[in-house]
Every structure is written in structure tokens, then in C-alpha cells.
Image (tube, helix red, strand yellow):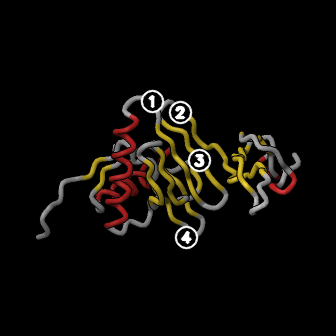
Amino acid sequence: MAQVIHNSQKSGATGGAEEICCGNLAGLRKLRRTCIPAEIGNSGKKATVGIDVMLKVKDTLRATVHLSFDGRVLKVYHGPDAKKRFANEVQVLRHLEARGCNFVPRLLEADAEALRIVTSNCGSRVEHIDDARAKLLFAELEKFGVRHEDADPRNITYRNADGRFCLIDFEFATILPETPKP
């Protein structure tokens, strides 16, 4: 296990990032501690302060996703149609929250300039799920007025806290037209 440099042990005025390995994650993935120059108190002294520790869980042509250990997921959009996909996911997550859908992430922050969202964590990805259960989960989403449009097991997570399968990644989802109630 690599030694973690605590904020109080590291000094200097330059920002940057350090890679660290922690506990049972050593050898699996590296964590990234993002550091920024900051003034400590009113002393005028500068120190480099670690603001978060995150695990990179996805890095594709379309998006990079980090998981923080305080329960947040940070997703940055890039590549083709990044602005459109960002706007769509924000709109869909707001729509689902307004309708009380409890098996999708909650949108905590949306930064249109940086094309970045911060959401709640909906558990860990599932390795295997049978087709029938996956189809039921995506069909359940449609009851909240959204078609996922990327109904693939990679977009299904399992939340241990309540034993619930959840859905993630709504950049291609469609909000269905409202149907009048009978």
C-alpha cells in the first residue's frame, strides 16, 4: 500500500495531481488526488491542498466518469455532440426526479460551460443480469416517461443499501410524450 500524503504534510505553491493506491484497490485501479494551491488561514502561507480522491471508472470517446468516496459521481462529456448529450442527460435526470423515480442517480450539479455533471451514486455495476430482469427494469423506466435508448447491461447498477437494481447513463435517452390519463 502506497503512503498517502495528507494535506498537512504536503506544501508548495504548485497545483497538480498525484496518483495513490489505497487498501484493496492497490493493483486494480489508481486513485487520483486533485490538488490545488490554497491559502491556509490568514497567514499568507500557501499549501497544496487535496480536494478530493476519485476513482476513474469510465474513460471513453464520449465521456470520462469518476467516482468520489463521498458518494458522488462526476461525469465530463467530450467528443461528438458533447453539448447535446450533456443537455439531454441533464433534462432527463431532472424529468425523472420530478416524477419520483428512485432507481436513477440524482442530479446534484450541472456545469454547462465545463460540460460536467455531478450525481449521486447508484451503486456498482452488475457483472451479469438475465435478459428478462434487464428488460423489466428498462420497461419500468418508461412508466416514468423515459425510454433509455441504450438498454445494455453496462447501464445497470446494483445499490446494496436497498437491494435495488438501478439505471445510469441517460445521454441518449428520450423523454416520451405525455399521454392523457384515462
Q: What residue type is labelled 3?
A: Glu
SS at badge 2: loop
The answer to whether the residues at label 1 and label 3 have Cβ atoms under 8 Å apart is no
Q: CB of mark 1 within 8 Å of CB of mark 2? A: yes
Report if the CB atoms under discs 3 and 4 are less than 8 Å apart. Answer: no
Residue 136 sits above or below residue 79 on the image: below
- The answer to which of marks 1 and 2 sits earlier in the sequence is 2
Q: Earlier in the sequence, mark 2 or mark 3?
A: 2
Disc 4 to disc 2, how far (Cα)? 30 Å
Nearer to the camera, 132 or 146: 146
Q: How many labels does the image show?
A: 4
61 relative position to 145: left or right: right
Q: Which of marks 3 and 4 is in front?
A: 4
The numbered mark at residue 127 is: 3
Residue at 33 percent across and 66 percent down: it is 98
Nearer the observer: mark 4 or 2; the answer is: 2
Please state which of the two labelled residues, at mark 1 or mark 3, is closer to the viewer: 1
Q: Which of marks 3 and 4 is nearer the N terminus?
A: 3
**What residue sits 11% from the left and 70% below the top?**
182
Q: What kind of residue is marked 4?
A: Asp
Label located before the other in sequence (4 or 1): 1
Of labels 4 and 2, earlier in sequence is 2
Measure the alpha-carbon separation of dots 1 and 3: 27 Å
Give the residue type at disc 1.
Gly
Q: Which label number is shown at residue 162?
A: 4
At mark 4, the secondary structure is loop
Residue identified by numbered label 2: 60
Residue hosting label 1: 79
What residue appears at the point 87 percent right and 53 percent down from the top-left corner? 9
